[in-house]
Each structure stands twice: as C-alpha cells, then as structure tokens.
Image (tube, grey):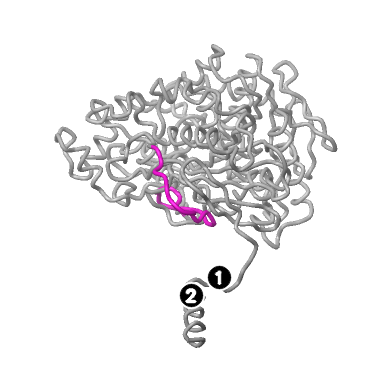
Amino acid sequence: MLARILMTTAAIVIANPATAQAGPPSPQVSIETGRLAGTSEDGVLSWKGIPFAAPPVGALRWRAPQPVAKWSGVRDASTYSHDCMQKPFGGDAAPLGTEPAEDCLYANVWKSGAAKGKLPVIVWLYGGGFVNGGASPPTYSGANLAKQGVMFVSFNYRVGRFGTFALPQLTREDPDHGLIGNYGHLDQIAALKWVQRNIAAFGGDPSNVTIIGESAGGMSVHTLVTSPLSRGLFQKAFVMSGGNGETANGPTLADVEQIYQNFAKAKGIAPDDPNALQKLRALSAEEVTDGLSMMQMFRPNGGPKTFTGPFVDGKILVDMGKAYASGNFAHVPMIIGATSADMGGKGGFMIAGARSASARIARQGPPVWEYRFSYVADSVGQPGAQHATDIPFFFDTTAIKYGDKTTPRDVAMGKTISAYIVNFAKTGDPNGAGLPAWPKYDPASDQLIDFTIDGKAVAQKDPWGADIDSEQQRLAAATQSGKYNSLITPIGALLDDPAAHAVLERFIPDIIKSDQINMARGVTLAALQSYLPGQLTEATVKQIDSALAALPGPKK
C-alpha cells in the first residue's frame, strides 16, 4: 500500500512540476469575468494575457470588440498572450516577445507588491505605424514604473488590415450601429472601458488614469482626447512623437471602401459578390496580412493601394484639428513632445507637430508641458536622438534595452525622466521634489524642457522655435507651388520621374544607388535628412530644391 501511495505521489509531481518546487504564492485577483493568477518577481506583482474583449476571429473579424466570456476556476495570467497579427520586421526598435496571432485582445497589469491604497494608473499605447507593434517587447515592461508607486497597464490593439477595414457590404450591414472601419481605435476604447470596470480589483484608481502613447500610439492619444466615445475614460494624456494632432487630407469612408475593394480583387474576390465579406473573412490571417509591415510602407508594392490606416469616420475618429480649434475635446492635462532627430527633422510632422499641438491645446485652457528628448545612450555612438529612442528612458528600462552597455549616465537619465511621468500620473503635474522645474507651455514664452545630450533636464525657450516657424512657412509655400521639392514629395515619386531622378543622381548619387533606397520611397528627402545629416546637408538639399523647381511639376 505504501509503495502504491509513493508511486501515485511521484506521478502527480511529474505531471504537475509546480507542486515539486513550491515558490511564493501566485497573486490572485477576481475581475468581472473570473479569477486570475499572476506572478511575483523582484517586489512587483503582474498579471498578463488578460482578455478584455472576445477574440476578433471568424465572424468577429472586422467587428467592434465584443464582450469576453466568463471562465470558471483560476486563469493563468503569468505570460503575455499573442500580439496582434502582423508581419514583424528586422530592425524593429522594440521586437515583439510573442508570435503574432489574430486572437490578440489581451491586457497586462503591473503593481508594486508593497503598494497600499488606490494607485494612479498609467495605460500604454504602442506605436508601429498602425501596421506593427504590440505590448510584449521587453522594453515596454511596466515593472520599474510600478516600483515608483503607480499601476501600469498595457494592451494590444488590432493593426494592419485587421485594425482598419471597410467594404460597402459591411457598411450596409452596419452590425455595430455606425461603429465601423477604425477597429484598432475601438479596441483602445474597449481596453480603457475594461480599466474602468476592473482596475480597482487590482488596487488601481479608475478615476486617476493617464494614457501615454508613442508614434502611432501618440497619434492614438490625440484620437482618444478628441473622440466623444472615450470621454471620461482617462484624466491625463501624454503624447510621444504623435504628430501635430490634425487629420486633414485623410481618406474618407468611400476612399477606404475602395482601397479594400482593391484588396478583395487582389485576392480573387469580386467586390460586388454578395458573399465578398464572407469570403474575405474566410482568408487566413496570413493572407489578410499579405506581407504588410512598416518596411512595406516605406517600399510600397506597385498597383492599386490595398491598405490604409485610420480615417475620420465622425464617431470614433473625428477631425482632430477642428476638435482642438473648437474646444470640443477632453480638457485634461497633457504632456507633448518628440525626439531631437525625429522623423521629418525640425520642421517635420513630429518636432514641429509637437510644438504646434502644444500651442493649439494650451490656448484652449488645459495645462500642457512640452518636451524634447535629445539624449543619446552612450553606446549608440551617433548624434541625434532618433524616433522612439526615448521609450526606454521614460519607462526606466534602459538596462533592458542596452544590456551590459548601459552606463550610469543612461540609468540616471531614465530615473529623471520616469520620475516626471510618475509625478504626472499621480498629480497631473510632472514637477516634483528633486527635479528641475518644468514650466507649463505658453505659446508666448515658448518654453519647453530638453532632456539634453549631456544627460540633464534643462528648461528653456525653444532654441529651434524660429527655425521651426521658418520651416513651416517653407512647407506652406512648397505645398502651394505644385512643384517637386524635398519637403512634401516622396522619394519614390522623384525616382520614378526621369528628370527628377537625374537631379538626385547629380547631387546624391551614392544615396540613390544604395540597396536600401527603395525602403525610403514613401518618405521625403527632408525626412531622410534626419537619418543622413552628413550626406544630406542643408546646402545639398537647397541645391536639389533649386534644381527641382526648374522642372515641370508632378502630373495631377
């Protein structure tokens, strides 16, 4: 009998090795859909892979997010669930930590194990051009911010053709009562509603939520601040490299429907087929993705367009410029900024855009703080803080990003910047004890804080203010000219026009002969200049613009 008991016990241990090594008990919490078991590590409790909406698969592909089914027992919440379906690309500044899949609407929560009382909540929205990105990259971990006394939440939202889609047939069916097309933004709103209903169970304060996003995530913050569907779901907003807060000249619903009719045709499906939508939903996730990634955005395929990002639909995504100008937006405290070598350079969409958005919003009354991130990690070895390089410093994850190349100065910069974020989340003001004063933005004084190349936080009048104003005037003139130029003409258009191609060959032959030039077809010379300042000097760009001005303009 004893031998049988011992053999049975051994079999149980082998079948369930967790019983063999008893560690600290898994932190458990009950939310509206069931009970969760998370993990405890280095003083931080976390719960990952929490469903906040039903899997958007099958008949729910291209539908607004639907409620999650309840589960019985205790759900394992120890690891990330899948990031949303996409084609990852080499060179991504934040590589995914999971295998992408269409079943992807999951959230993650971090808090300090020593935290008491209701915690302010920070909710992260990743970037990736609305075609890439996810919550799982290691540098997006919320553990270090949680140690500073906040609750950190991240989640996935649909990207690519899963996140933005329209078809006349779907518009007529209208299964979600006018909520159509911008499914990625609907996921974001659904996640914020989930936070409101559930975050108190983890110890978070649903009445003190800060949303923060970078690049496409920053643009999404502007969307959420101006969307009537997200009012009351957050109390503060932080825009990192999120552009100018405008949606002018974007596609209409009719344009988006045409783009996805093109996609249907490319897949051998007649758009007027009564079963076109059903047939598109029957395609595999890989077939819908069809190689789409950030790299394809820079190197578009020939033929009719088969993808577009978010568009103004009037309910989910409104005309942001009009909303900010009229005051019809969530009047919450905001931080807005960009990196010093961000896409487009000084006068581009990111740097000049952050300044113009700060001014527009500040004039309407809400407190705004503007920043510029100029610091470059010691191991990078090149000038200029490129797009997205600020994220590890804001999240205090520099050691994760740079590994054994992380220096004390890198760590100190991360501690300073993350302290501002935590103060903002707690009080609605980034200022706090031991930090250099960060003045509110006022267009008249044009003051921002610069996280400088030498690792200091310096408040000053924007040293690029006059240059940005001059660039904006040049941009307006370039738009009105109807000519090819470095500010608004995509490189691909210049390469495809024999006369314009000859101009580029005369001034920058090494660049246009590069194997990588096709990756830059979708950007302008001005945008490329921030990445190649030594080859695309101001003098060279002026010579190119002068030569292009002598050519006939692009065909209408």
Q: Is residue 533 visible?
A: no
Quadrant in which the C terminus appears: top left
220 left or right, relative to 451: left
Q: Residue at x 62, y 32 (%)?
A: 209
Neighbor class of circle 1 (other Cα within 10 Å; few <14, some 14-19, many 20+) is: few
Counting residues from the start of the chain, the first of labels 2 and 1 encountered is: 2
Q: Which residue is mark 1?
A: 19
At 61% from the left and 19% from the top, the residue drawn is: 331
Q: Which amino acid, by three-letter code, is at mark 2?
A: Ile
Q: Position of residue 204 (x, y in %)?
A: 63, 38
Q: In screen coordinates, is 362 left or right of 214?
A: right
Q: Secondary structure at mark 2?
A: helix
- Determine which of the numbered discs, if any, sits on residue 277 in the image: none
Quarter-of-image position of residue 466: top right
Name the residue at 61% across, 18% down: 360
Residue 484 in the magenta stretch? The answer is no
Viewer-closest of 50 and 56: 50
Residue found 52% across the figure and 54% down from its top: 77
**Label 2 crowd bin: few (<14), some (14–19), many (20+), radius 10 Å:** few
Q: Is residue 72 magenta?
A: yes
Q: Residue 195 location in percent, x, y?
A: 54, 36
In the foreground, 207 or 475: 207
User: Which contiguous range is marked in magenta?
Assistant: 67-89
